[in-house]
Image (tube, rainbow, N blue to C red):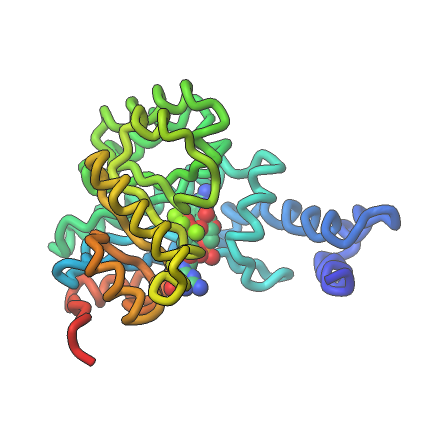
């Protein structure tokens, strides 16, 4: 890892190389390299959005998509959002990136609607500092309006971490988002901590069961118990449940038979390019769970 950071630092060129001092550990150098490249990334057109299908576990039909940011940088190559999003947060770059993502996704929804490809509902991830930002709710509203996209086509994914930091403020922000008409999903559910008292007060439509509980859901009693508890908790609170990271037919069958509403995962499809997802909208496949 240390060598990798150094090599990457060198690839960034002499100016950037000067930032990498002896005293810094490999991780700090790597984060610094990421942030210096992230600064110009929107302007250089280095981002794109991929779309991963969400499929009904009851009917097998395509019910929506999650927008997932992709970054290709000349010096760094492809960098996972799991790596660069936390850095963008740390250096205050996430809001500008978030503006670009929201604009791109709303523009794409509009394009699909103009092509007669239906009312696809797309989920956009908001990180903690975006969610805390006062301008986010008006930004969502303005972006939808500018593209002429109905709010019902957009869903916002937030994590427990981003809402539980200041839960009272979050209740307010979530209600303002709901008032616009966008859907709200609580992402990676079960990995952070949520007060059940607040869960009741959050106007959430969907709980997403984290992949870590889905991995062994068909084989480990403990993960099965957690998944089933999340499903009944959600349904008792009038929320739907989406399982993330579903990779095998066993997982899907188990979740379907226990009432989970929808799934997202490599079993049905990896995140797709715009062209790939457009092709899927033109010729949707139906997930077959009963055939072996
Ligand atoms: P997330 O929101 O929990 O997104 C789901 C992640 O699981 C995605 O990783 C997706 O590619 C991956 N995934 C889906 N199905 C499977 C599967 O069956 N197997 C495996 N192994 N993985 C699966 P990705 O695209 O690398 O994104 C990682 C995280 O980065 C996201 O987690 C989200 O927290 C964040 N992120 C991505 N795009 C954005 C964005 O536009 N804005 C913000 N703020 N965060 C984003
Ligand atoms: Mg998500
Ligand atoms: Mg997730
Ligand atoms: Mg996750």
- Quadrant, the N terminus: bottom right
Relative placement, left or right, of 144 versus 14 is left
| Residue in view at x 58 percent, y 34 percent | 92
- Quadrant, the C terminus: bottom left
Furthest residue to the right?
Answer: 22
Question: Residue 64: where, in percent of width, then height?
Answer: 23, 52
Q: Is residue 35 above or below residue 160?
A: below
Question: Residue 283: where, in percent of width, then height?
Answer: 15, 68
Residue 151: tell me if it is visible. Answer: no
Residue 251 or 35: which is nearer the viewer? 251
Residue 188 or 257: which is nearer the viewer? 257
Say which quarter of the image contains residue 143: top left
Residue 22 or 72: which is nearer the viewer? 22
| Residue in view at x 21 percent, y 37 percent | 236
| Residue in view at x 31 percent, y 45 percent | 230
Question: Residue 58: where, in percent of width, then height?
Answer: 14, 58
Relative placement, left or right, of 12 versus 262 is right
């Amino acid at each position: 890892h240390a060598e990798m950071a150094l090599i990457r630092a060198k690839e960034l060129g002499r100016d950037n190389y000067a930032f990498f001092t002896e005293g810094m550990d490999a991780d700090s150098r790597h984060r610094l390299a990421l942030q210096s490249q992230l600064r110009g990334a929107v302007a250089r057109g280095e981002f794109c959005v991929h779309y991963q299908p969400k499929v009904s576990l009851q009917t097998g039909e395509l019910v929506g998509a999650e927008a997932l940011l992709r970054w290709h940088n000349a010096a760094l190559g492809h960098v996972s959002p799991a790596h660069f999003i936390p850095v963008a947060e740390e250096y205050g770059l996430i809001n500008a990136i978030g503006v670009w993502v929201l604009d791109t996704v709303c523009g794409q929804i509009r394009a699909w609607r103009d092509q007669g490809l239906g009312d696809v509902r797309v989920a956009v991830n908001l990180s903690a500092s975006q969610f805390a930002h006062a301008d986010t709710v008006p930004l969502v509203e303005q972006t939808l309006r500018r593209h002429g996209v109905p709010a019902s086509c957009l869903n916002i994914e937030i994590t427990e971490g981003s809402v539980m930091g200041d839960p009272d403020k979050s209740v307010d922000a979530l209600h303002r988002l709901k008032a616009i008409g966008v859907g709200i999903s609580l992402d990676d559910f079960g990995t952070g901590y949520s007060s059940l008292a607040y869960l009741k007060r959050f106007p959430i439509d969907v709980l997403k069961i984290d992949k870590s509980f889905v991995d062994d859901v068909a084989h480990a009693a403990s993960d099965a118990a957690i998944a089933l508890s999340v499903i009944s908790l959600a349904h008792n609170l009038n929320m739907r449940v989406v399982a993330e990271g579903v990779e095998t037919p066993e997982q899907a069958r188990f979740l379907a038979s226990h009432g989970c509403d929808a799934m997202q995962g490599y079993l049905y499809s990896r995140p797709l390019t715009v062209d790939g997802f457009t092709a899927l909208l033109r010729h949707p496949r139906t997930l077959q769970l009963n055939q072996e």
